[in-house]
Amino acid sequence: MPPSRLPLGLRLLPALTLLAMLGPVAAGLAGTVLPAFGVFPAAGLTTPSLAPFRDLADWPGVVAAARLSVTTGFLSTLAALGIVTLFLAGWSGTRAFRVLERLLSPLLSVPHAATAFGLAFLIAPSGWLARLLSPWATGWDRPPDVALTQDPWGLALAAGLTVKEMPFLLLMALAALGQVDAGRRMRVAAALGHGRTTGWLKAVFPAVYAQIRLPVYVVLAYAMSVVDVALILGPSTPPTLSVQIVRLMSDPDLAMRLTAAAAALLQLALVAAALAVWRAGEFAVAALGRRWIVSGRRNAAADAGLRPLALIAAGGSALVVLLGLLTLAIWSVAGFWSFPDPLPSGVSGRAWSRFAATGGATMADTALIAAVATAIALALVIGCLEAEHRRRRALSPRGLWLIYLPLLVPQTAFLPGLQTLLLTLGLKSGLGPVILAHVVFVLPYVFLSLGDPWRAWEPRFATVAAALGTAPGGVLWRVRLPMLLRPILTAAAVGMAVSVGQYLPTLIVGGGRVETLTTEAVALASGGDRRAIGVYGLAQTGAVILPFALALLLPAWLFRNRRGLA
Amino acid sequence: MSEGLRLDGVCILKDGVPLIEVDATVPPGDVLTVMGPSGVGKSTLLAFLTGTLPRGFAGMGRIILNGEDVTDRPAHQRRLGILFQDDLLFPHLSVGENAAFGLAPGGSRADRAARVSEALADVGLSEFEARDPATLSGGQKARVSLVRMLLSEPRALLLDEAFSGLDAALRAQIRGLVFDRARARALPVLMVTHDAEDARAAGGPVFEMEAWRPSAS
């Protein structure tokens, strides 16, 4: 009953989990701050100085790079949140909504790089859309010379991030909807003469937004500092700040790491400032919203315009991702494919057989990293949730912030520091550190995925089992874990998907020596071998879909004679 | 008298405020009924007895079972069987596996299987071992719950609105079955209910609780 009865291991688990999650972040930030101020013992530098910041300021692209990070971050977050909000407002509870919801859920797991490549292959001047429309509609006999991807304003980058983050925010919002009694709020709004969209915005949105605030912050921080998508869809001269940090990090001249560290601190400051601006924006929107509500205007006619718009935006972004994957698939087996033919003139398995010959080790490492990182995360999360259950104390809001913290600190701000720290300590980079770095990002998602079903479990099952003479450990292993097999496997699949999709932790902490499907795919971006990119993009997607399929099929088979768990 | 279940000056506090006070002894084979509308903390009293009091609640007083103080024992070492309104059969296990869940370890596999079959047959559920509990009727589920609880050889029986989910005819039948088995094994029974019919059928003393303030008899 009292906490003191918890076994020592279980009592220490929450602390250990925090250490696994925040330790690398803290160590990485420390490893960033020191070199940013000129202290880098590995290169013989021990006197603090501001030279790294001067070097950063001397780089002519710094202002443009920083501005690009900010604009693409805000643009994509606003667009993703806007689409989700309008779509929920106009369509939640309808059949169209359920269809799209089912379509979007699996898209959530498609790796960022695969989504970005798919979009690039679709909208590029020589992309599939241009081919489908040429020459009959466009008059193009050759790809037009316009920057549709890697445009200097980062619009393609923002579009890629929008279609990728939209499903994430939608699923978070759906989970929130269940908790705010949206149905009754809407009935009251309708009874007071409000239309569907505006009624939802006035009566439901504030409650939903309060619940998805942290995920929105995660999207903003991520979009501002993403590297793999920016390498594929973003401009290159100058690139975004985060891409520049990675370039500096991979420079053979160790002194460049000082500039990289300074840039990483700038990135951190930008994200912190952006989050503060966003927070201020929340207050402004809330104030305006109140005035709108108090004004009594019903705007019932808005439905006619907003509902079709919302459906097109949400359906369109789902369609873009799906068509992108299809384009990857076509390219992966394409023989000769000249512009503007809508389809290749022949089918060739050469790219796949090359992958079969050389990709085995990469696949094995990808699977190994994902499996071990997920197993560690799952063990820690289950331990924490079990400790929470036995202490009968739920996670505080402050605890939730801690879980989101590794997702709010930009990866480029602490991963370079982590690698520099490993270097300073004389530790080899390799699989081990990469796995630990993956745990930092896998853990929060596993926690978020498993937390709700774990807590929703009927606690009287534990009371009954204990009354039957079963010790707490027995209750966990013989009752709770088997009953929660389905959500546990889903959480594992989420963890695997997060790990498979990681680019920067693998690249930076692995010191360039650890290769996964994602690092290989992104490395192909500069080469332009579309068939190889198609193969790697699909392999990446497959590596993510397989665990989800298992998480669906395994319980269905195991519990085929247990209707209570069907 | 040391036999039976004794609640010695038991008082449950919620955030420091007294909620329920009970001082009573239930002799073996007897039923003590605790009655009152929902929300007065009847189930909290049982949670104190089973050692699963939620955070925010504190229990004082002693729980004496056959002369032995079990107040400080962890939940799984108290051997207080409990039946809830819901059957709470483990959905991942078969009927037979559910019944065997609380069997003390030891004995041959065949021996244990025989005890399970016998106990199931005793409540009219012969050959039900392999069934999926989700496919049973409400009355059948209640009987499997009872069998599972009895096979764990409890020293007292707690009933938390155990019959409230059943329709009238079934309710009398299951209630009779439970009281019968408890009497046959000389188990003290503490029943929490809001239904006067349950209290009449139990035949023992009734302890009335009121909603607005803690009461003691």
Image (cartoon, coloured by chain):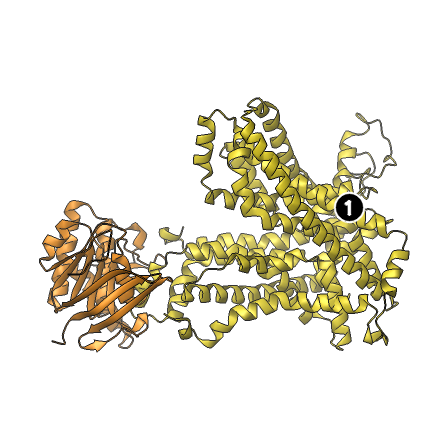
From the image, state the color of chain B.
orange
Residue A471 vertical placement versus A207 (above, below): below
Q: Residue at x 58, y 30 (%)?
A: A292
Secondary structure found at label 1: helix
Left/right of residue A97 with respect to residue A77 in the rendered view: left
| Quadrant holding the N terminus of chain A | bottom left
Q: Residue at x 82, y 76 (%)?
A: A41
Q: As rendered, which of B6 and B177 lies closer to the eye? A: B6
From the image, state the color of chain A.
yellow
Q: As rendered, which of A360 and A80 lies closer to the eye? A: A80
Could you tell me the amino acid type at mark 1?
Leu
Left/right of residue B56 with respect to residue A280 in the rendered view: left
Residue A151 percent location from the top left of the image: 82, 41
Name the residue that disc number 1 marks.
A233
Q: Residue at x 57, y 25 (%)?
A: A303
Residue A140 vertical placement versus B28 (above, below): above
Pointer 1 local density, CA inside 10 Å: few below 14, some 14–19, many at least 20: many
Q: Residue at x 78, y 38 (%)?
A: A127
Q: As rendered, which of A356 and A135 lies closer to the eye? A: A135
Number of numbered labels in the structure image: 1
Residue B33 percent location from the top left of the image: 16, 58
Q: Dot 1 falls on which chain?
A: A
Residue B133 percent location from the top left of the image: 30, 54
* Residue A239 makes an appearance in the image: no
* Residue B34 makes an appearance in the image: yes
Residue B32 percent location from the top left of the image: 14, 61
Residue A399 vertical placement versus B25 (above, below): above
* Quadrant of the image occupied by residue A495: bottom right
Residue A188 vertical placement versus A456 (above, below): above
Q: As rendered, which of A6 and B138 lies closer to the eye? A: A6
